[in-house]
């Protein structure tokens, strides 16, 4: 049998959702870089609110200057946080490999920590927290790429290969 042939354990929807999560995370890293390079980190002085508004109801007419970069960064981060939560629950329920359950949980915890760190960098006015925020961002991106790889048909084909004879 072709080792790469799809089996019952291959879930293309889960795989493509993991790919989409990694792709959105990639965009988020770029947007975060724009926040830093435009020195827009403190353009929105409060968190989790945005100028006293629920961040999801902040009027688009006010997304101007540095606020645009910081606010869209927060919105995209919220989307990535939601996608990561869905991915972790999906893995827990549907992936047959226990270590994948815990990798999903690790991604969930990391995205929560990352969001809180971004918020604290604003509320505590601490530039140095931005360094940890940037580092965790890259670790998190690698983790989302790993989840996409490990849910792929290609990877599962490798897992099914018999050990090589010496
Ligand atoms: C999945 C979640 C997030 C990821 C992956 C992420 C990623 C990043 C990245 C890559 C940067 C650029 C860092 C650099 O170039 O040095 C950045 C900057 C920043 N992020 Fe996030 N971020 C996330 C969530 C948040 C949230 C929820 C906030 C809430 C306030 C936030 C606030 C900031 C701020 C203020 C900066 C600018 C830091 C500075 O210039 O000192 N981030 N983010």
Image: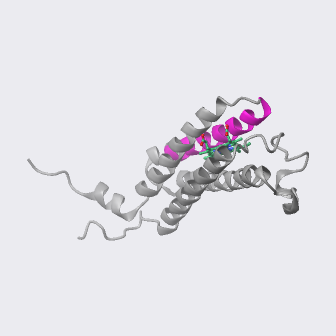
Picture quadrant of residue 86: bottom right
Q: Nearer the viewer, residue 96 or 165?
A: 165
Residue 61 image position (x, y, % from top left): 87, 62
Picture quadrant of residue 62: bottom right
Q: Nearer the viewer, residue 47 or 62?
A: 62
Q: Is residue 122 above or below residue 63?
A: above
Left or right of residue 151: residue 159: left
Left or right of residue 162: residue 140: right
Q: Nearer the viewer, residue 42 or 135?
A: 42
- At horizontal 89% and vertical 46% (from top left) the residue drawn is 51
Residue 92 image position (x, y, % from top left): 55, 51
Left or right of residue 153: residue 69: right
Does the stretch in magenta take in 107? yes
Does the stretch in magenta take in 115? yes
Ligand 1 occupies quarter: top right
Q: Which residues are magenta?
A: 103-124
Q: Main secondary structure of the magenta part?
A: helix
Residue 98 image position (x, y, % from top left): 46, 46
- At horizontal 61% and vertical 40% (from top left) the residue drawn is 109
Q: Nearer the viewer, residue 93 or 39?
A: 39
- At horizontal 50% and vertical 61% (from top left) the residue drawn is 19
The quarter of the rendered structure image containing the N terminus is bottom left
Residue 50 image position (x, y, % from top left): 85, 47
- At horizontal 65% and vertical 31% (from top left) the residue drawn is 129
């Amino acid at each position: 049998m072709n080792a790469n042939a799809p089996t019952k354990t291959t879930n293309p929807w889960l795989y493509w959702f993991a790919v989409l999560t990694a792709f959105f995370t990639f965009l988020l890293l770029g947007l975060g870089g724009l926040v830093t390079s435009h020195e827009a980190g403190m353009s929105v002085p409060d968190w989790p609110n945005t100028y006293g508004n629920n961040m999801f109801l902040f009027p688009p007419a006010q997304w101007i200057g540095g606020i645009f970069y910081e606010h869209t960064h927060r919105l995209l981060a919220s989307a990535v946080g939601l996608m990561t939560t869905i991915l972790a629950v999906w893995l827990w329920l549907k992936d047959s490999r226990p270590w994948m359950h815990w990798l999903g949980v690790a991604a969930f915890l990391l995205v929560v920590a990352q969001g809180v760190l971004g918020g604290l960098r604003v509320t505590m006015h601490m530039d140095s927290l931005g360094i940890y925020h940037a580092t965790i961002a890259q670790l998190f991106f690698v983790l989302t790429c790993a989840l996409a790889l490990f849910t792929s048909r290609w990877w599962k084909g490798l897992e099914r290969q018999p050990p090589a004879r010496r």
